[in-house]
Image (cartoon, rainbow, N blue to C red):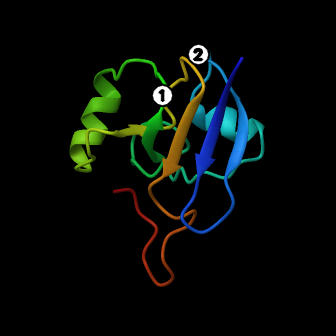
Amino acid sequence: MARARLSYADRADVVFEASPVVSLLVAAQRAGAPLRHDCGGKALCGTCRVRVDSGSFSPILGRERARLDAVGAGSEERLACQARAGSDVEITAILPLSPARGAAARPE
């Protein structure tokens, strides 16, 4: 079993078990590590984007690539709902856990 370290801009890092069988989002949820995912983990919104800091991951497939392109993600970004860990990994949440106050909650 691999380990994942999830870093945030405004809270302490969380370390949890990761697997090549389940997405990083599911692994984080199982460990109680919060990670925003407005569409429920279906690669529709891009809010679960994480920056890849280290480690190896599953390949980016069509649905994830399309969403990453649609939101203008950088080459070092992945969707946690689609990416699976192939080794110990370090990732950083891109977006805050909830939308800014006063902002309409809508997918990107």
Say which of 70 and 83 sits in front: 83
Residue at point 22% right, 41% down? 69
In the rendered image of this protein, does residue 83 appear above or below residue 16? above
- Kindly state the secondary structure of the residue where label 2 is placed: loop
Neighbour tally class for label 1: few under 14, some 14-19, many 20 plus, Cα within 10 Å: many
Query: Which residue position is annotated with label 2?
Result: 20
Residue 13, given in percent of the width and then of the height, sits at 67, 53
Specify the farthest residue to the front: 54
Say which of 70 and 12 sits in front: 12
Q: Quadrant of the C terminus?
A: bottom left
Residue 61, given in percent of the width and then of the height, sits at 33, 20
In the rendered image of this protein, does residue 39 appear above or below residue 94? above
Structural distance between the alpha carbons of marks 1 and 2: 9 Å
Specify the farthest residue to the right: 31
Residue at point 48% right, 28% down? 83
Say which of 98 and 75 sits in front: 75
- Give the left or right position of residue 42, taking residue 89 as reference: left
Q: How many marks?
A: 2
- Give the left or right position of residue 36, taking residue 33 as reference: left
Mark number displayed over residue 67: none
Query: What's under tag 1, amino acid-wise?
Result: Ala
Residue at point 56% right, 31% down? 89
In the rendered image of this protein, does residue 27 appear above or below residue 105? above
Mark number displayed over residue 83: 1
- Kindly state the secondary structure of the residue where label 1 is placed: loop
